[in-house]
């Protein structure tokens, strides 16, 4: 798997986080991540107490979204956000998302954004079915810090956080 630093994820327990950002309802067919992020980044300094250099690209898929019967027209919520140390005034046009604690499989995707689908496909069609975990219905997200060099940079790295729980065997 050429875009994964390792095909075996690190299993991490997420501590609760409060994010502030711009949320849109999209599908794989309609999302424009570059425009979404540009609009958010132009306003990120309006978010009081945000943690500098840490960004979250969050997907809220909900109960009805299916990874096994993938439908590119299925709708989900997409966020461009930052974590805050303490929630204060939320800027107009932005929303608050509280990430609850829970178990996550964390992969490192290295490469351009256009190659992300192969990482996603590996996680859901190879790693997940062969692991001791199943998908949990919580937000998925990519964590972007100084390792992320932009969507067209082949040296960009981002952490891919997939919510998991132990399979009921």
Image (spheres, rainbow, N blue to C red):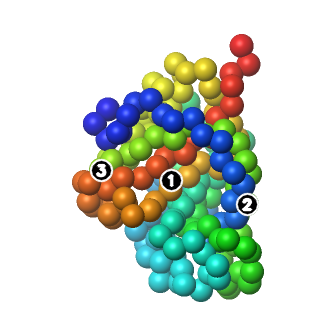
Q: Is residue 71 visible?
A: no
Which residue is at a point 74% across and 84% down the rendered structure image? Answer: 89
Q: CA distance from mark 1 to mark 2?
A: 15 Å
Which residue is at a point 51% across and 65% down the rendered structure image? Answer: 55
Position of residue 46 measured from the top left corner of the image (x, y, whole percent): 59, 86
Quadrant containing the N terminus in the rendered view: top left
Q: Secondary structure at mark 1?
A: strand
Which residue is at a point 40% across and 68% down the rendered structure image? Answer: 34
- Disc number at residue 168? none
> In the rendered view, would you say 4 is above or below 140?
above
Residue 45, quarter of the rendered image: bottom right
**Residue in front for this viewpoint, 9 or 91:** 9
Quadrant containing the C terminus in the rendered view: top right
Q: CA distance from mark 3 to mark 1?
A: 13 Å
> In the rendered view, would you say 91 is above or below 154?
below
Q: Residues within 10 Å of mark 3 (few under 14, many from 20)?
A: many
**Residue in front for this viewpoint, 81 or 17:** 17
> In the rendered view, would you say 81 is above or below 161?
below
Q: Pointer 3 and pointer 1: residues touching (CB < 8 Å)?
A: no
The residue singled out by tag 2 in the image is 98
The residue singled out by tag 3 in the image is 111
- Disc number at residue 142? 1
């Amino acid at each position: 798997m050429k875009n994964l630093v390792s095909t075996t994820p690190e299993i991490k327990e997420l501590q609760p986080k409060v994010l502030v950002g711009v949320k849109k309802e999209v599908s794989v067919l309609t999302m424009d991540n570059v425009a979404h992020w540009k609009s958010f980044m132009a306003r990120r300094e309006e978010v009081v107490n945000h943690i500098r250099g840490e960004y979250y690209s969050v997907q809220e898929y909900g109960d009805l979204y299916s990874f096994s019967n993938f439908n590119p027209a299925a709708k989900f919520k997409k966020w461009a956000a930052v974590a805050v140390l303490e929630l204060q005034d939320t800027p107009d046009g932005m929303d608050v998302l509280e990430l609850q604690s829970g178990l996550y499989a964390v992969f490192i995707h290295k490469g351009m954004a256009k190659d992300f689908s192969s990482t996603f496909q590996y996680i859901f069609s190879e790693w997940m079915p062969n692991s001791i975990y199943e998908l949990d219905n919580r937000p998925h997200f990519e964590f972007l810090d100084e390792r992320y060099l932009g969507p067209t940079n082949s040296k960009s790295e981002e952490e891919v956080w997939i919510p998991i729980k132990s399979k009921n065997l």
